[in-house]
Image (tube, helix red, strand yellow):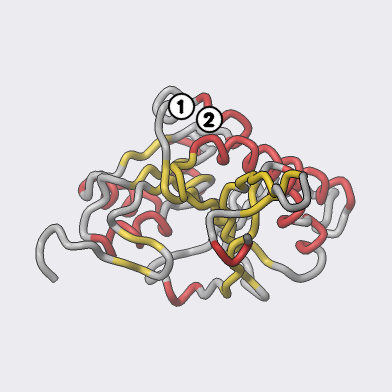
Amino acid sequence: MGRGRERWIEHYSSAQEILLVGEGDFSFSACLARAFGSAPKIVATSLESQGSLRAKHRSCLSHLSELKRRGCLVLHDVDVYEIDLHPALQWRKFDVIIFNFPHAGHFPWLRERNPQLIQMHKNLLKAFFENARGMLREGGEVHVATRDDYPYNRWNVEELAEEAGLVLMEKVWFKKSDYPGYQNKRGGDIKSNKTFRLRNCFTFKFALQQYEYDYTCDEMSVCSDSDDFI
């Protein structure tokens, strides 16, 4: 493939401005960077500080080195609840914003089916959707990869996105094997470097809702950027 030509891996292109949120050991962003050959259009972020990240994910070192070598901007201490206010991000717009397997944290006294933890997950996603929508370019998309079986389907991902002004464009299977080198880390403070089982996983693709005036019925109608939703 010639130098400078657009390269793809699954849903993602080297021509897109891509923001990755909540990276674990940065293996997913490193996978994209390798597929593209270079990564000047990728911004990869983590909630953890650089020191905390290295303590929790030893495997991050090689990925961070590769991302730096390929021109990716890596940011630490980036909180989803305030991501749109980060000095390096508040004026930028993206074609795709990716949040793979969002999770509000692990607690010894809470299981995934616990209503309290489910609400914490929903609060996290609500904040993410509300902040991400203002960081999209025209025609941009927000991608969330998550399990869609119980109790994860209790998060009501589609409903939370709709409340933030986003509409579901597509729901596709997430296959780890499509992203060579990617390791889905638990994160948090309990067995953070362990991977977790990926079952019934999908990538939910959302886009901004558009409002059009329907003169035939004299009321506002909602559509997405896709003609399929008009």
Q: Position of residue 25 (x, y in %)?
A: 45, 52
Query: Would you name the residue on which mark 2 appears?
Result: 84
Q: Position of residue 77 (x, y in %)?
A: 50, 31
Q: Position of residue 174 (x, y in %)?
A: 55, 71
Image point 39% across, 61% down: which residue? 12
Mark 1 neighbour density, 10 Å: few (under 14) some (14–19) many (20 or more) = few
Query: Would you name the residue on which mark 1 appears?
Result: 90
Image point 70% across, 47% down: which residue? 215
Image point 62% across, 72% down: which residue? 198
* Res. 3 visible in picture: yes
223 vs 71, left or right, is right
Q: Position of residue 153 (x, y in %)?
A: 78, 63
Mark 2 neighbour density, 10 Å: few (under 14) some (14–19) many (20 or more) = many
* Res. 59 visible in picture: no
Tell me which corner region of the image, top left, top right, bottom left or bottom right, holds residue 219.
Answer: top right
- Label whose residue precedes the other's in the sequence (1 or 2): 2
